[in-house]
Amino acid sequence: MKEKYINTGRTHQKLETRKLILKTAQKFLNKGMDVNLEDIAKEAGISRATVYRYFSNTDILAAEAGLDISTKDPSDIYQEIKGKSFEEKVLETQRYYNELAVNHEKLFRKYLSTVLNSNASTPKRGARRKKTLELILNDTDFSQDEKQKLSNLLTIFMGIEPLIVAKDVCNLNNSESMQLMEWGMELLFKGLFHKKEE
């Protein structure tokens, strides 16, 4: 996904177009068919150039479409945790994305490899964790600057990237990795709320 393009102009419409492209690619994948930008564009009723604005090659599109099948939309996750405390919302979100990473680790690693090996100058991804956290932070009284920083910081404690570090660098198993990330999040909360009380 080309983040610069998504973040200019009619953002909602662009996100809907991106979802349409992913859903169309999933139809091809579910039928065992190869994914190519021209067929996706034709089936979705949009131009090949439009598809290319969101996904620079078929490997990235196919990898993300495969992951997208298994991943809840941020707004659905938010609806499930609405009404809970800030800490509970964040920890439940962390558990969801950490379990997703563990359960689909091979697919995530393949996706990361595809994105990193692409010719895109700045490869971007779906950023579902950050979007979920932004929805949670909208319910808080943190300043806009704090919300922005927190959505970035909290994202670092969940998903495939910290799982890879915990397993490959720290030599932890899945359970130990998830416990460590949750402990890190709880320590962050202690520091965050201690600072706010000062």
Image: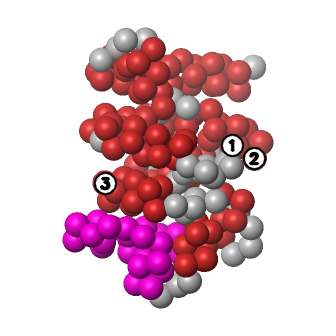
Residue 70, disc: 3
Q: Residue furthest left?
A: 31
Stretch of the chain drawn in magenta: 16-43
- In the figure, 29 relative to 41: above or below? above
Residue tagged 1: 147
Residue tagged 2: 144
The percent coordinates of residue 61 (x first, y second) are: 45, 61
**Depth check: 53 or 160 in front?**
53
Give the quadrant of residue 105.
top left
The CA span between labels 3 and 2 is 31 Å
Residue at image location 39% in from the left, 59% down from the top = 62
The percent coordinates of residue 149 (x first, y second) are: 70, 37
Residue at image location 46% in from the left, 62% down from the top = 58
Q: Residues within 10 Å of mark 2 (few under 14, many from 20)?
A: few
Give the quadrant of residue 14.
bottom right
Amino acid carrying mark 1 in the image: Lys
What predominant SS class does the magenta segment belong to?
Answer: helix
Labels 3 & 1 near each other (Cβ < 8 A): no
Residue at image location 43% in from the left, 11% down from the top = 170
